[in-house]
Structures are given as C-alpha cells and as structure tokens.
Image (cartoon, rainbow, N blue to C red):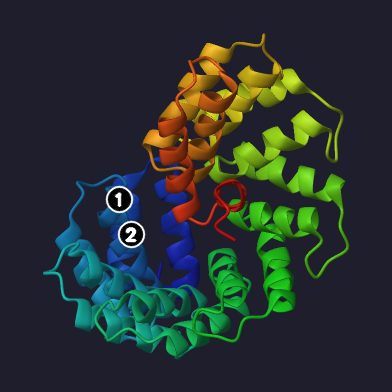
C-alpha cells in the first residue's frame, strides 16, 4: 500500500466498502486518517455517522470530522458546525456552530454560505441580520445552490433585507427552477400566469405548477386545479380540477374548501349540491377564511343549502370585510 498515493489508497478503501468488505475498508481508512490525510478523516466521520459497516457512533464521527477540520478540510468545517448546531456527537453550541460555518463560508464553501445565511436570518449563534443573511445567500447563489437561490429570490420578491426587485426575483427563481427546486417552480409559474415582469405565458405557468405539484408542493395544487377548471394553459378538465380541489381540502387547505364549495354550487366536475356547497363554505368560514365568510354570507342571502338569515349574513360580511375582502366591503358600503 505504501506505493499508492493517499488519494488512491482512500479510493481503494471506498471500493472495498461498496463491495461490503468493511474490515479491509476500515483498515485502509484508518491508515490514511492517521497519516493525517483530511479526506480520509472526513470519510471515517461519515462512516461512523451513518454506521456503514460499523456500529453508528456519533462521538467518533465528530472526532474525525474535527480532525479533518483542523487540517483545513472545508467539508469537515461544515460538518463540525452542523454537529455543534444540532448536538450530534458533541454538546449543542450554536455560537461555535456559527464560527465554524463562517470559517467554511469565508473560504467559499457554498453549503456553508447558505447555512450562514440561515444563521443570520434566524439568529442562530449570532444576532439576526437581514443584510448579512442576504449577502451570504447571494454568495451561495453564485455557486448555483438551488435552496439558496430560492431564498434569495424570495427576498428580492418580498424586499426582505434587500431592495425589492421583481426582475431579480424572476431571474433567480428561474435559476432555482432550472435546478428543479419545486417551490421556485411554483413561484415562477405565478409570475408567468400574472405576467409580472415577464410576458404572460399560461402554458408555461401550467407546466411549472404541474411540476411543483408532482414534487409535493401543496400550495400549487389549487392553482393547478384552477388551470384545469378554466382551461388555462391546458385543455379544460373539470373532473381533474374537482379531484385536485378535493385532495387539497382533505389536507386542510381552507381556500380549497372555498373552491370545493364553488364546485358543488355550480356543478363543476361534480353533480350540483347546494347542501355540500354550504358545508364547505362553512368549514372555510369557521377557519377565518374571508372568502369562505363572504361565500357563506351569499348562501344565507340566496338560500343555497340553508334558509335565509339576514343577521347571520351581515355578521359574515362584516367578518370578511374586516379582513379586507373587497366584495364584502362593497356589499356593506364600507368603501
């Protein structure tokens, strides 16, 4: 083995590990690690952290991560920080976690830059600082990290710690969406749907929302259902719209309650049923949803699934109007 470079020796050990020859692999890893080879020390940390062919041992994992970190290995600086943040193999210490993240981030390690942005945003081991958070998210962004891209885009969109700029938000959402970040796909789809700082493109909006829903973004479901219901960027498919609304409603989305109420009231993708419409609007209203309150008020006015009740109607309109619901305010003459 002495004729092999340290890198080659480590690679041989990794191949043994992949084949299940764990004893041989561990002998090679330990030889390289005790020769002070940082990648081997880091790999031993991972081996003990995840129990690959050995009993899981977080304390030994931390020990090897720290040895590699002391030798300047960037991945290990990040892992040591992570261990301190979550108390893995060592006592939890957020201030020390922050210091290690910063050491790695300042050497342009993108994952650590993103983590440091989170520290500044959430006050982890340091006082909250939105400007610093934006700076480190931006630095991670330059390395193409999709999560950091999404967070930076969100900041541009909301003006959080940085000047609000929809153009920059869209450009950054595009980069994150290109890396298949599901929430970035959804957000970008909304920009295309509304035509905000980009040319309106319903087909692109539909494609992006569908991709986001496929990856489990619950917030995108009602948008996708709406596209199917009205044929926006795709063929009209009211049955599909109803199924998606129903799925979101079953998971507790109060806006989906309202859309489902509309489906039952108007016979969209399901047989018309005023009583079901009333029940779904009522569920939304009980959760404080202003659209649900307004729709339920109309049920009392128009006798949809319930008898007339002018007093209850006014109460619901006032509740919706107090939350800024435009149509409810108009009905009450508040504007």
Whether tag 1 and tag 2 are in contact, CB under 8 A, the answer is yes
Residue drawn at point x = 33 percent, y = 51 percent: 24
**Number of numbered discs overlaid on the protein picture:** 2
Looking at the image, residue 70 sits to the left or right of residue 164; the answer is left
Residue 252 higher or lower than 14, as above or below: above
Looking at the image, residue 323 sits to the left or right of residue 200; the answer is left
x and y, in percent, of residue 271 in the image: 67, 8
Residue 130 higher or lower than 182, as above or below: below
Query: Is any atom of residue 180 visible in this view?
Result: no
Residue drawn at point x = 63 percent, y = 19 percent: 265
Q: Nearer the viewer, residue 150 or 272?
A: 272
* Badge number at residue 50: 1
Q: Give SS at disc 2.
A: helix
**Res 301 quadrant in image:** top right
**Res 261 quadrant in image:** top right
x and y, in percent, of residue 262 in the image: 63, 26
Residue 324 higher or lower than 91, as above or below: above
C-alpha span from label 1 to label 2: 6 Å
Q: What is the crowding at mark 2: few (fewer than 14 residues within 10 Å), some, or many (at least 20)?
A: many
Q: Mark 2 points at which residue?
A: 46
């Amino acid at each position: 083995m002495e004729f092999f470079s340290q890198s080659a020796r480590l690679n041989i050990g990794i191949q043994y590990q992949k084949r299940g020859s764990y004893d041989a692999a561990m002998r090679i890893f330990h030889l390289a690690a005790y020769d002070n080879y940082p990648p081997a020390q880091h790999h031993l940390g991972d081996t003990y952290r995840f129990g690959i062919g050995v009993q899981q041992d977080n304390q030994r994992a931390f020990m090897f991560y720290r040895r590699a970190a002391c030798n300047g290995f960037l991945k290990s600086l990040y892992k040591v920080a992570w261990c301190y943040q979550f108390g893995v193999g060592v006592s939890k210490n957020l201030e020390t976690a922050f210091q290690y993240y910063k050491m790695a981030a300042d050497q342009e390690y993108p994952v650590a830059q993103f983590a440091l942005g989170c520290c500044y945003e959430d006050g982890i081991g340091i006082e909250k600082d939105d400007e610093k958070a934006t700076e480190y998210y931006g630095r991670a962004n330059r390395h193409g990290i999709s999560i950091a891209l999404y967070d930076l885009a969100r900041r541009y969109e909301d003006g959080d710690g940085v000047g609000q700029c929809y153009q920059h938000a869209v450009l950054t959402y595009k980069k994150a969406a290109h890396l298949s970040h599901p929430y970035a796909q959804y957000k970008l789809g909304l920009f295309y749907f509304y035509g905000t700082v980009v040319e309106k493109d319903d087909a692109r909006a539909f494609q992006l929302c569908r991709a986001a829903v496929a990856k489990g973004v619950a917030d995108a479901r009602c948008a996708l259902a709406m596209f199917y219901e009205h044929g926006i960027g795709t063929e009209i498919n009211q049955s599909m719209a109803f199924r998606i609304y129903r799925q979101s409603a079953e998971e507790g989305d109060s806006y989906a309650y309202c859309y489902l109420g509309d489906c039952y009231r108007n016979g969209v993708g399901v047989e018309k049923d005023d009583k079901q419409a009333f029940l779904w609007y009522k569920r939304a209203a009980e959760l404080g949803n202003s659209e649900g309150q307004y729709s339920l008020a109309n049920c009392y006015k128009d006798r949809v699934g319930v008898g007339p009740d002018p007093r209850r109607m006014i109460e619901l309109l006032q509740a919706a109007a107090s939350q800024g619901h435009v149509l409810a305010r108009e009905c009450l003459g508040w504007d």
